[in-house]
Image (cartoon, rainbow, N blue to C red):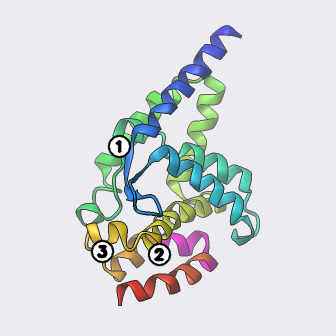
Amino acid sequence: MTDRLAAQFAFLNEADRLKSVLRATTLCDGSRPENSGEHSWHLALYALTLADHAPEGVDINRVIRMLLLHDLVEIDVGDVPIHSQNGTAHASPETQAAESRAADRIFGLLPPDLAAEFRTLWEEFEAARTPDALFAKALDRVQPVMANLQSGGGTWITYDVTFDQLQSRVGTKIERGAPRLWDWVREKVRPYFG
């Protein structure tokens, strides 16, 4: 039992480092960059609050678990903004390989049963093929959009984002996992892009 607890606390102590990873997205008030720990918490709250907009059959508890785990790899890799470098770095093979190595290291701190469970949830989120993962991915894309709307443009200004880029990099993911959300959000976003 003491070895198990030591491993669990080692993982939790390492996870605390996520609070030091700054993201490109700011807080809604634009006062400072959001950190990845705040982002993960906010996404879990998004899932809880927007559960009634999930497609039928989505298990919100699994979605929340995915969202709490999904960015832990940023402890090693950092935040890779979706609108940076024309959006290519975000999903590049190099970034994906670095994130996989980070997942090996970070989840490897846990006892084997938890390591396998958490890694499986992380991989499911990354693959975005199940209804739970698609909804989780949609929320991960919609939250920065809402922060940008609230902060007067945020990273859209920083990265000179067009509506077409927003639609292709973000909107398509939201549409796949939460079409009703994108219908509503798209109408809020359109005036910003003229």
Question: Residue at label 3?
Answer: 161
Would residue 104 be found to the left or right of residue 116 on screen?
left
Measured in 3D between alpha carbons, the distance from the residue under mark 2 to the one under mark 3, in whole angstroms, is 13 Å
Would residue 89 be found to the left or right of residue 67 on screen?
left
Question: Residue at label 1?
Answer: 78
Q: Quadrant of the C terminus?
A: bottom left
Label located before the other in sequence (3 or 1): 1
Indicate the secondary structure of the residue bearing disc 3. Answer: loop
Q: Give amino acid for label 2.
A: Gly
- Front: mark 2 or 3: 3
- The residue most toward the left is 85
- The residue most toward the top is 2
Q: Residue 47's quadrant in the figure? A: bottom right
Indicate the secondary structure of the residue bearing disc 2. Answer: helix
- Contact (CB < 8 A) between labels 2 and 3? no
Q: Residue at x 45, y 58 (%)?
A: 27
Question: Where residue 11 sits: x, y (%)?
Answer: 54, 25
Q: Residues within 10 Å of mark 1 (few under 14, many from 20)?
A: some
Range of magenta residues = 171-180
Label located before the other in sequence (1 or 2): 1
